[in-house]
Amino acid sequence: MDYQMTEKNTGCRPSAIGCGVIVLIMAVIVICLLIWIGGLGESGVRMANEMEDYALEYIEKHDILNGTEEIIAYYDATFTLDGTEAAILTDERVIYHKNGQSTAIALKDVVDVKHRFDKTNGDIIEIVSNNGKIMKIEIDPSDSGESFYNALIAILKNKGITLN
């Protein structure tokens, strides 16, 4: 018996084509996202010798550093790595830049540094100044936050600053 097309057995073809189109569109979206993510730089704490050009350009364009400072460590907290939210450790200050504003504590004013690791938030560093000002820096779990903390402690020790 030959199979004959009727109205009853032709209904699956348009829906199969529709499903195929949806799957194709989803595949294209996933591929585009992977290409976009792959084009981003690597996240994580950077030391001065590892700085990405985009970060240096952003810091210079927005006058975040004074003329005498040198970067020791840098962490870009954004997913897109655009420098709009970053923690910056220099040889003079620790700076948190967010929403176009920079908050800074001079290293000479640091009296205490606390560090803890939380599985969800990652490394949490709290820096206390002699006037009671507290800066909190959160670094994602996979972004080597301990490197930022170690650099901070090392520069404080190098400058002869003792912590409480």
Image (cartoon, rainbow, N blue to C red):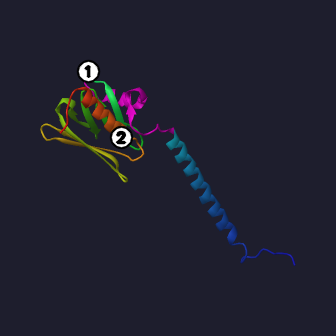
On whether residue 57 falls in the magenta region, the answer is: yes
Indicate whether 90 appears above or below 28. above
Boundaries of the magenta span: 39-67
| Front-most of residues 66 and 162 | 162
The disc, 2 or 1, on the residue closer to the chain's N-terminal end is: 1
Q: Which quarter of the rendering shows the N terminus?
A: bottom right
Badge 1 amino acid: Thr
Q: Is residue 2 visible?
A: yes
Mark 2 or 1, closer to the camera: 2
Badge 2 amino acid: Glu
On whether residue 107 falls in the magenta region, the answer is: no
> Outermost residue toward the right?
1
Asked whether, in this view, residue 93 is left or right of residue 119, the answer is: left
From the image, tell me which residue sits under label 1.
68
Q: Quadrant of residue 35?
A: top right
**Residue 146's disc number:** 2
Q: Residue at x 33, y 36 (%)?
A: 150
Looking at the picture, how far across and down is residue 163, in whole percent? 20, 36
Which secondary structure, mark 1?
loop
Q: Residue at x 12, y 38 (%)?
A: 131
**Residue 24's disc number:** none
Looking at the picture, how far across and down is residue 127, in whole percent? 22, 40
| Front-most of residues 81 and 93 | 93
Which secondary structure, mark 2?
helix
Q: Is residue 100 visible?
A: no
Indicate whether 119 appears above or below 94. below
Q: Quadrant of residue 154?
A: top left
